[in-house]
Image (spheres, rainbow, N blue to C red):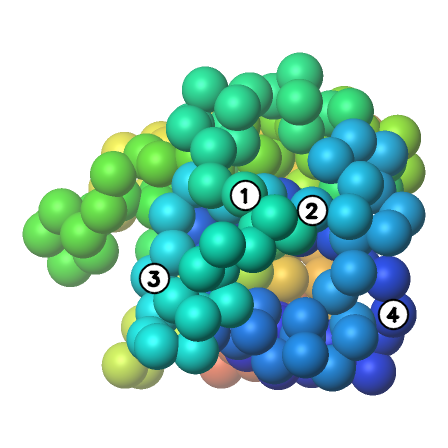
Amino acid sequence: AVLACLGDRRDLGVHSGVLDDGVVDLIEAGAVTNARKSIDRGVTVTGLLMGGSRLRRLAHRNSALQLRGTAYTHDPAVLASLDRLVAINSAVEVDLTGQVNAEVAGGMYVGAVGGIVDFLRGAARSRGGTPIIALPAAVGGRSRIVARLAGPVTVARSDAGVVVTEHGAADLRGVGLRERMERMIGIAGPQFREELAGSIA
């Protein structure tokens, strides 16, 4: 969804754990050139390709796209050296203090920790970087912004940066717990805000 909105940009750089077909459109449109990357200039870097024939054709013998191991793609020091790194990760749920569950949904294990902590920390240390958690405010009539996580803490509140839903963005960096809670309630689904506010009264 994010990639689909970036076609009108220019000279974007890509460094990711996984790429899908969406990056092909951006490269072909000239949006992704990697020309301004502070490292790996001119090169799209990823650890895994997950797409169809267009992505495979793009990658075939293409020196401007490199597959690297996770020791490089997920190294927080490497990530921090990328100026203005915007790391976008998803989550199952986020609590009012910024703790993130990205592993368990409805009592079922749906994914490993992966690179979420590495990328959030790398973006936080990047000059001008932004660590982002993006998720829908609600799914199936249940709020994804919660008073208490139903699953494990994948990301500690100390690593929370900016949490984004369709109702806005809550920048949690450098603010106390009460302010965090108020900002998180502000991006929850409107139908859940009163109940969430009651949980901190």
Please indicate whether residue 2 sits to the left or right of residue 154 in the image.
right
Label 4, label 3: how far apart the Cα atoms are: 24 Å
Label 3, label 1: how far apart the Cα atoms are: 14 Å
What is the x, y in percent for residue 92? 35, 55
- Tell which circle, 4 or 3, labels the residue nearer the N-terminal end: 4
**Which label sits on residue 66?**
1
Q: Residues within 10 Å of mark 1 (few under 14, many from 20)?
A: some
- Between disc 4 and disc 2, the foreground one is 2
Determine the residue positioned at 63% across, 62% down.
Answer: 164
What kind of residue is marked 3? Met
CB-based contact (under 8 Å), mark 4 and mark 2? no
CB-based contact (under 8 Å), mark 1 and mark 2? yes
Camera sees residue 147: no
Please name whichever residue, 185 or 30, is drawn nearer the observer in this view of the structure: 30
In the displayed structure, would residue 113 be above or below residue 88? Answer: above
Dot 4 lies on which element? loop
The residue tagged 4 is 10
- Tell which circle, 4 or 1, labels the residue nearer the N-terminal end: 4
Determine the residue positioned at 54% across, 43% down.
Answer: 66
The residue tagged 2 is 43
Determine the residue positioned at 47% across, 41% down.
Answer: 67
